[in-house]
Image (spheres, rainbow, N blue to C red):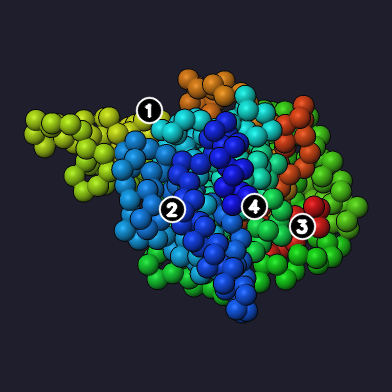
Amino acid sequence: RQLLTRIEQLDREFNSFITITAESALEQAEAADRCLAAGGAPALCGVPIAHKDIFCTRGVRTSCGSKMLDNFVPPYDARVVEQLQAAGTVSLGKTNMDEFAMGSSNETSFYGPVKNPWNPEHVPGGSSGGSAAAVAAQLVPGATATDTGGSIRQPAALTNTTGIKPTYGRVSRWGMVAFASSLDQGGPVARTAEDVAYLLAAMSGHDERDSTSLNRPVPDFAAGLNDDLAGLRIGVPKEYFGEGLDGDTASRVQDALKEYEKLGAKLVDISLPHTGLAVPAYYVIAPAEASANLSRFDGVRYGYRCENPADLRDLYMRSRGEGFGEEVKRRILVGTYALSAGYYDAYYNKAQQVRRLIKQDFVQAFEQVDVIMGPTAPHPAFRIGEKGDDPVAMYLEDIYTLSANLAGLPAMSLPCGLVNGLPVGLQIIGNYLDEGRMLNAAHRYQ
Ligand code: GLN
């Protein structure tokens, strides 16, 4: 009740929720009370959370931040929603996001931009800006999010919260609206690495309904949080501290690295030579996959349908023309172009080859180091509207986050100080399935 009141009072300004499910939240909370009284309650019994509006929720609208799905009420829950429900959490609603998770500022949402609680004239990052802002404003202690190219980590960095994108395949994508299926991965945003560890444990695990789900045991992520960091080898890639990185942001990250040295870790200079190719490779692969995934929104099966279509072609054209926003259309056009006969080899195939090289950089780096650290984003939160009409400037926001998705590696962001009153994030990239070690490193710093 306290949080619902807080949401009612504060979220008119922040706009971090698209849908608030007050009634069912109170019912779930009462059930949690009964469960706690009876004993043997599940791990997260009664913990209030919110779900990014990309996760299907049975009987509750799932818009994905788009007019296209403004009227879509799924008949089933996403795997992640099922898991968190089984763990005892109470969902307060669905959080705002960039349309179809395409964006780095939450400005492409059909439901309007989210404001950064640290300064409402600034963006909270994206695409999981609603989840991050809701945690930062203490409207919920934790929320689900997704990360295709940084959408968990970058908003976490910009709002002083902690978020993790686990190893690709760790968290089921079943019931999560698809953007770029080979890159999409769900994960939690919360205040601390410890909270994130509990939420991630509940969200992880094999799911036969997702063909890319990993069939690996889920470790107790919270068990090793306090392990000693003595001897931890931290790789510091020189490409993450070059041109384009704001000086004050670099200083906060360097200060954090010094703290790690005090905790007994060893800094190792490394190189990830193909880092500069991550943005162009990603912005071919992600739109290519998106153009295929979004072809299902045709105005026939579900979602928005235009008024009075003249014929089938008119129905397709106007439903998609009216239902999708500008950024989504741009991605569909770029993706369709990159996949078309005659251009496929020059763009899509080439991008896949670059993807392999980026992955290879990490394989080599992890022969020398245990984790990699650097900035999550090149600077603190920018102003709402500042990059509105420059898609390439917006794409460059993702320069440090895209590589982990292209390689399928786990990566997280944690707060590491402020610049002019705005938060800066430290990024930790780990080896495959090594989330436990990353959370341990983050927890000891916090
Ligand atoms: N900002 C990136 C994009 O717009 C990443 C988004 C995401 O991770 N969902 O594609």
Give the residue at mark 3.
Answer: 443
Q: Which residue appears farthest toward the right when viewing the image?
A: 262
Gap between marks 4 and 1, in whole Å? 33 Å
Residue 193 point in image, percent of width and height: 71, 56
Going by the numbered disc 4, the residue's amino acid type is Pro
Q: Is residue 317 left or right of residue 425?
A: left
- What secondary structure is found at the residue carrying circle 4? loop
Going by the numbered disc 3, the residue's amino acid type is His
Give the residue at mark 4.
Answer: 141
First reached walking from the N terminus: tag 2 or tag 1: 2
- What secondary structure is found at the residue carrying circle 1? helix
Going by the numbered disc 2, the residue's amino acid type is Phe
Gap between marks 2 and 4, in whole Å? 18 Å
First reached walking from the N terminus: tag 3 or tag 1: 1
First reached walking from the N terminus: tag 2 or tag 4: 2
Mark 1 neighbour class, 10 Å CA radius: few under 14, some 14 to 19, many 20 or more: few
CB under 8 Å between callouts 4 and 1? no
- What secondary structure is found at the residue carrying circle 3? helix
Could one spot residue 360 in this view of the protein?
A: no
Q: Is residue 415 above or below residue 167?
A: above
Which is closer to the viewer, label 4 or label 1?
A: 4
Gap between marks 3 and 1, in whole Å? 40 Å
Q: Is residue 226 above or below residue 109?
A: below
First reached walking from the N terminus: tag 3 or tag 2: 2
Give the residue at mark 2.
Answer: 55
